[in-house]
Image (cartoon, rainbow, N blue to C red):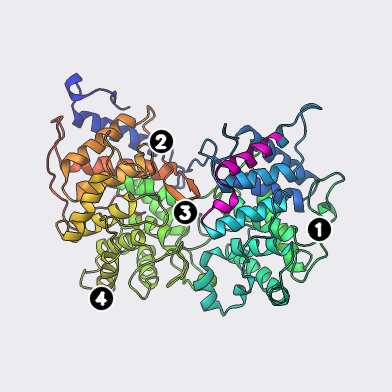
Amino acid sequence: MSLPLNQHPQDGFDRQARLEGALAASTGLLLATQLPTGAWTNPRPAAVSGTAGAALALHLAGTGADRALAEGGCAWLLRVRNPDGGWGTLEGFPSDAVATCMAAAALTLVPVPRQDPGDGAAPEAVAGALAWLGAAGGVGAIEDRTVRQLCSLVLALAGLGDAGGVSRVPVELVLLPPALRRKVLSYLSPPFIALALLQSRSGARGPLARGALAVARPAAVRLLGAVQYQEGDVGSYGGDPWLTGLVVTALASTGSVASAGSSASAGSSAPPASSAPPGSVASPDGARLVAAGLDYLRATVQPDGSWCMIHGMETARVEVTGPAFAAAALGTAGLADDPRLVRTRTWLAGCQQTAPFPLYDCPPGGWTWSGPKGWPNVLDSLAVLEVLLQGDRDAPALRRGLDWLLARQDRRGSWSTFVRDTLVPLDGPCPYITAKALLVLHEAGVPESDPRLARGLRWLLRRQDRDGGFRALWHRGVVPGTVAVLRLLAALGRSRSPAARRALDRLRAAQLPDGSWSTGDRGEPGTADETARAVLALVACGDGAPAVRGADWLLEHQRPDGSWEPGRTCVYIRDHVHYSDFLMAQGLALSALSALSALADLSDPSGPSDLSAPAAGAGTGDAR
């Protein structure tokens, strides 16, 4: 149990004692919540878009029992609407366009049972959503073309907008040779195809577009089948109810579902099914995909009628990344050899993918976020490799993982997330991931002189922004990318290099008056995630005063149970869909406080002006 964290040294508790109490409380919480397998359950708030997407799919393509699930999902949507009329990504989050459009479409198409004859909750909520969108400038004001297409087509599906002015989704890209298609579409194949199918409801404009659609539609459905199969054939896309619901909705709304239970009930507001075009849901392939997707959605509904964001591939949620953060932090806190952490490393090794993932031209040896099934990627693999490096350096899973990581390096020296040498900006190349990959390889014993590391470092240092910061594709703000590079440079003995000095200046400038760091968006308060990251980098570079101020903020904001409130720091759709990760925040905060505690005597309330930087190869604490 931690000491009273609102007490200051002059009140009888010195900083070192408070730090030790906070470390004990955080460590105790994580160990107490560890599962017998060595894993953890990562608390996930319910997701608005996931619930709306699932409700649409179950209503449009499911049975009568499925429509009851859809109605339950819409009832949940009504309960979590924001006072401004919109919806946020997760319950309680600020309103955003994607969640608001998805919720409005679901509440329009799915008949929510009325509590009394005069109940107008759903129509009022839809009107409020449209008013919120209008006040934000409307869908046309969304700068991102793909997000604008998504919102426009979902609203058009529900009769709430006109899709005629939406820029064409070039579905013929699915006909490209696989190597080129991977580079152009990458991991976005399922949402891209879903949007193309939704757009096809209004017909293709011009003979060339109609011809391209007729040829590409069957290939698009086959590609969806390949994605579903390679995920483990569990019916999902990305282990995400939102994406799964979007794909099933697109398939179901572009043809007749060939099942007795799927015809719209009398009085339903579902859009009429068109005659089934080739490759639509009425085809055997399409019908199978819809049936599997519906099974996945039925299996993952939550007791309150909602669906989680990124539920995973299994009915019981299995998540790799959050537990990896927790385990890495416990290892940094001195528990790497504890049998409970050994058990975690064994479990993580068992989640390593043993088969190739041809859609990404990806060999076996990597990890994904949801157990052994799913989309292998560098970001989540780095989180696991960091934990495995705390154990047996000759363990087969670690050696395979490091070989896999080297094989995923881009030709330019960088690392992307899913596909090597991708042309998709949201996939890569990514300075944050590249810095993390170089640090893991360095700690695994790959020398700095190795041509692969030298090439990666050259690429990375050329990506420094003018203000000194570095970017991260999957996290908000300047802190994550800048911190990742600083920790790499410190491990390489370059913490006093010009690039490191500029990055340090940028990091110091981002510190808020209360000692914390935030995502950088105007008005957003500091978060445990960003503050912990910054402290880790400052400790690594020996910059004591701002590190201690950040640590003091973490101490003040630790909750009575030893945890910290996670921030909205993770990115699902850049600038539009963000989410929080509980275990990530706990791991980062524990790692930061452990690193600070190991390096200095903090009993002086003013804090040290300088810390001794750790030796090259010291533990990194987190991998993402």
Under circle 3, the secondary element is loop
- Residue 115 can be seen in this image: yes
Query: Which residue is disc 4 drawn over?
Result: 451
* Residue type, numbered disc 3: Arg
Instruction: Please state the horizontal and vertical placement of residue 58, each as a whole percent of the image.
Output: 72, 49
Instruction: Please state the horizontal and vertical placement of residue 476, each as a whole percent of the image.
Output: 40, 49
Magenta residues? Answer: 124-143
* Residue type, numbered disc 1: Ala
Badge 3 or badge 2: first in the primary sequence: 2
The image shows residue 116, relative to residue 253, as above or below, that is above
* Residue type, numbered disc 4: Pro
Q: Nearer the observer, disc 2 or disc 1?
A: 1
Q: Distance between the residues labelled 3 and 2?
A: 22 Å
The reply to whether callout 2 and callout 1 are in contact (CB within 8 Å) is no
The image shows residue 516, relative to residue 572, as above or below, that is above
Picture quadrant where residue 532 is located? top left
Q: How far apart are marks 2 and 4 (CA)?
A: 42 Å
The image shows residue 608, relative to residue 492, as above or below, that is above
Labelled disc at residue 574: 3
Q: Distance between the residues labelled 4 and 3?
A: 33 Å
Total tally of numbered discs in the picture: 4
Furthest residue in direction bottom, as rendered: 177
Query: Which residue is disc 1 drawn over?
Result: 273
Query: Which residue is disc 2 drawn over?
Result: 565
x 82%, y 45%: residue: 268
Q: Nearer the observer, disc 3 or disc 2?
A: 3
Quadrant that contains the C terminus: bottom left
Q: Residues within 10 Å of mark 2 (few under 14, many from 20)?
A: some
Under circle 1, the secondary element is loop
Badge 2 or badge 1: first in the primary sequence: 1
